[in-house]
Image (cartoon, grey):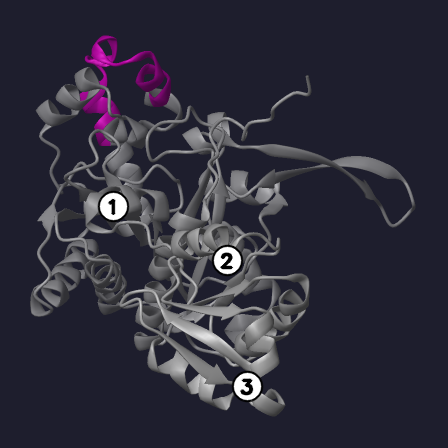
Amino acid sequence: MSKIFSAPRGTADILPAEMFLWQDIQDTARQIFANYNYREIQTPVFEETELFTRSMGKTSDVVQKQMLNLQSQKKSDAGDIHVGELSLRPEGTASVVRAYIENGLKQKENISKLFYIGPMFRGERPQKGRLRQFHQIGVEVIGPGANHPYIDAEVIALNVNLLNAFGLKEFELKINTLGSLEDKKNLSKGLRKLLSDKISKLCPDCQNRFERNVFRILDCKNEACCQVVHDLKISDTYLSEESRAYFAQVKEALDGLGIKYLVCHDLVRGLDYYTHTVFEITGFSLGSQDAISAGGRYDNLVSQLGGPEIPAVGFALGIERIILAMGKSREPIIQRPNTYIVSLDEKSFKKGFEILNILRSMDISSDMNFHVSSMKSQMRSADKSGASSVIILGGSELEKQCVSLKDMETGKQEEISIKNNDYSILIDRLRERQ
């Protein structure tokens, strides 16, 4: 017996009944982005590994544990072959920044407002709503004109409005500021000082993080670590006056828009490139893996990846998490044809196939059974398809140059002329029922 294959662990098929929900989410997102004047960008699903190690930091959990690397052969200019390392993208920001730099978008516009929709990849342990191949909708605002606290507020408002447009109501927006790079260094030193006598209470991962990336301790979901972090009573004393003023303007703008938020001084992002504003949106129905969306400002990443000193801010939300948060409020949508053609013999089958393609060319969703069988069997197939109308075609219809059109809801049946291959009456009648 041949082996039966399964989808790789940590991946999932998106079946036709589910696809319409995915498309609805993406179509809704694209409409909201158009309202905000954001434009779509697509980047490759893999990049040079160094792009991610440099952007996210070699000590980040993503780089340390979750990167899915590829091996490829590359030829140098001298013709020598050597192995170059590529990685499937674990997030979208680094790729968009790389594209911004490489394609000289700074020379073309003062501010680039970009969005992307696509798959990301992380080699972590699969959990509910947390797959190895997952899908994100993301936003990046990059350019000399992006250096204003109200840009932060716009991006956060855009994120919230997206979730509202998806029909989500039960979520919480948390915000914080990490301040400048210097402020961030002060926070790092302060955290190590506060945690120095509590290391033994931390989980093994966080004990390692203490030296290599202390911010990740604040993001740990382990109960003991959460309690330690809670007891630290972290404040904003590490911030400069400039950073405080910047964050105050972000909050002022959000207040003006009527967007509710909670300031959480222990909120950080796990990637090294964040400075100043960071935020996270959590769903109440998702359990421990409750983050729906997250983002923040990263003013140093463009220069870090070889570009000029240019400010930027963005966010990403997970489509799988969105669907989980929707729960039963958004049931799968099943596409149903408007019309089903039933052909009772081989001769009428050929005519039915001709009519099928004419209807499709007129934007009337149609289908048929491609195996001539009994009337009862084909009507059963038509009923299962969910079609609102059935065209019945047999020897008598061919002789009279007509079709029998049945309304599946009322059961009413009538003859429609198709003499001289004139389908206008039939098409008008079907459009009335769409």
Camera-near label (3 vs 2) is 3
| Residue 3's disc number | none
Question: Which element type, helix, strand or loop, lies under badge 2?
Answer: helix
Mark 2 sits on what residue?
A: 96
Relative horizontal placement of residue 18, taking residue 239 as reference (left or right): right
Q: Secondary structure at mark 3?
A: loop
Camera sees residue 183: no
Look at the image and give the residue range highlighted in magenta: 190-209
Instruction: Determine the residue positioned at 50% across, 58% down.
Output: 96
Sequence-wise, which precedes: disc 1 or disc 2? 2
Is residue 420 toward the left or the right of residue 237 in the image?
A: right
Q: Nearer the viewer, residue 150 or 246?
A: 150
Residue with the most extreme right position: 79
Question: Which quadrant does the C terminus fall into?
Answer: bottom left
User: In the image, what residue type sits under mark 2?
Assistant: Val
| Badge number at residue 178 | 1
Mark found first going from the N terminus, 3 or 1: 1
Q: CA distance from mark 1 to mark 2?
A: 23 Å
Q: Is residue 61 above or below residue 255?
A: above
Q: Amino acid at mark 3?
A: Ile
Q: Is residue 254 above or below residue 208?
A: below
Question: What residue sits right under mark 3 in the picture?
Answer: 418
